[in-house]
Amino acid sequence: MVDAIPRFHEHSPFFIVPLFYTLHRPQTVSASSSHKPIAGLLAALIFLGAANSPAPAPNDEKRISVYSAVATYTLPVVDRNGHEYIGLLEMLEPLGRVSARADGRHWKLQFNSIDSDFVAGKTRAKIRGRDWDLPGPFLIESSRGLVPVNSLSTLLPRFLGSPVNFHESARRLFLGDVAVQVTTRLDSANPSRLVLDFSAPVNPTIATEPGKLRMVFVRDPLMPPGNQPLSFNDQTITQANYAESNGAAELTISATVPLLATFTNGGRTITVGPTPQETTGGTPAAGVAPGGTPGTSATLPPASPRFIAIVDPAHGGDELGSSLSDTVLEKNVDLGFGRLLRHELETRGISTILLRDNDSRIPLNQRADAANGVHVGVYLSLHASSQGTGVRIFTSLLPLAGETKGVFRPWNVAQAPALGASQTLAATILSELQKHQFPAQGSRASVGPLNHVLLPAIAIELAPPKGNAIEQLASANYQQRIASVIADAVAAQRDRPGAQP
Amino acid sequence: MIPRPLGIAVAVMLVTVFSMGIYVGRMRRQAADLPIDTRPVAPPPSGPTETVTLYVADDALGAVRPRPATIPLPGGRQQRAEELLRALLAIYQQRNSPHPLSAAADIRSFYLVDPGAAVIDLNAAFADQHPSGIQQEQLTVNSLVQTLAVNVPGINRVRILVEGKTRETLAGHADLTEFFDVSAVNQAVSGQ
């Protein structure tokens, strides 16, 4: 799972892409002997590439996880004056139409049709025309409005109109009926296995250490099991513990032997048992197998950690995209759809980077540059339109190529070697969409930044369902169904041999 | 002494004349407020009529389709290309067009530069009032490029400018910063 949102540096992007582009990635910095004549040049590229690559977020960064039917997301938490604070605009942004402006010491926020007014340094705020007290003073920093984290359980219902379930000490916030429940049962066969059944597909990060297997759920709204710790009268698997902190839930299985986790039932069941080597007296080992197929119980090979889906909601900031209606902007639909698609992809064990996770404008060259930092995967540019119906998939319409000089390929046709794989991906998605009765059409278009991306790359333009109004286009239900189909197709592309250029 | 009926008749006539004066004054003010179309009026094309194939975008189909048209075409390649583009634009500006474009949209000029290179210069209204969306913008590009490529021999790349300058996109999506490869557009149109 990729939690870090890429951070972009302000230097100008490359306008020429080296053919040996993988060499400027930090993890592959050794040049082979065949590249010696250009070693000096590559060294410079390595340096620049390292400076240009996404920086991972530190693991100890305080964060809050928000789970809702519309989006699942994490936000950073900052400490101010002995309180934990969070950006209110960032908190509400994925949940509806929101805008805010700082006016002197006042910070006015509108969420859907609800107006509110906060004052820097004051605890008194006005929401829906009524006074309301925060547990700590409101802060304004660089035009961002910050509220105490411990205000969320009472503050958010005033905007959302429904109660929320906030695990404050763990900073996990549940909006609506999204919780995932887990039940456990010990299969005392020889060897013993612990079967964990979840009420929805899950995609935890799994780590092992001698005698323990830990599953960390950041993006899954997992709730604690009824009784815990769960002790088992078994010589192999002895205990299961649930804990949650810093926006994540953790299940720890204790055993007397090394453990292996396998996923089945579309990610709804995780079976934990001794590693096969241990049961036959071999060398202890441990593994993870996310993305299992329904009905299988055999241990599956781990998904390739290097396959990454780059999900890129188009537009953002002052670049609005199309005005889909008087109230619906394309940039917001793109972002909501991107978040849903990320969730669907991660549910299928595909590491996903969402290039834009807020209302910011990212230049096209920076988007391509971020995608080109990934060696194996796919790039999905997301758009929306009020015209037509269903889904349209576009591959690159390459312009006339510039001159290729030595190892360098012109920036404007960087996509050329991957175009075949892009068309295969587009055809797979179209086939899946048509199989699920969605109107779908494929074509080629000169839309940025497809031409500059080295990965298989497509643009997806979402239009309203047949015969429905524009509001349906913005509905989470419609977008969720399409995201699910697209994620299936991407998973098929990942598993297809030779699908990468 | 003026007879009473005559007085009433004169009064009615005066009121009528006064009301008409106010009404005419208001109409003149409204006429003055209407925008004046300052676009130069192109001379009517001269030369024999010719049957050509225009490639017309259709939003409902999501495709560009060939449509025969008989239009007067001058002899020179440049003038011929301009007339083709204007004939195409006229279709898009009709009522019930399959791919409606603004009535203010216009082709400012057309140039043949290097051998094989053509430049279409659109006016600002063409781009500013163009519907936004990948499909709609690309259909416009494909329609312009394919119509030129089929009817004006020797063009293998086309660049689209707006008011004589490079513009990043037509209406937020279609990339206008590069020359369009006529053969690539032809493949895209054929594949629809």
Image (tube, coloured by chain):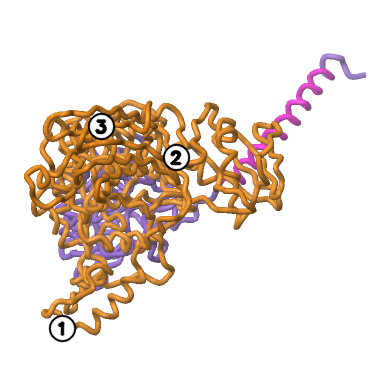
Chain colours: A orange, B purple
Which chain is home to disc 3? A
The percent coordinates of residue B188 (x first, y second) are 18, 51
**Label 1 close to label 3 by CB (< 8 Å):** no
Residue at left 71%, top 46%?
Answer: A122
Q: How far apart are marks 2 and 1 (CA)?
A: 50 Å
Residue at left 22%, top 35%?
Answer: A270
The percent coordinates of residue A444 (x first, y second) are 21, 50
Which residue is denoted by mark 1 in the rendering?
A36
- Can residue B65 be seen in this snapshot? no
Front: mark 3 or 2? 3
Q: Is residue B29 magenta?
A: yes
Could you tell whether B38 is left or right of A257 in the image? right
Helix, strand or loop under label 2: strand
Q: Does the magenta stretch include residue A334?
A: no
Near-viewer residue (A463 or A150): A150
Q: Please report the bounds of the magenta region as a residue range.
A: B7-34
**Label 3 close to label 2 by CB (< 8 Å):** no
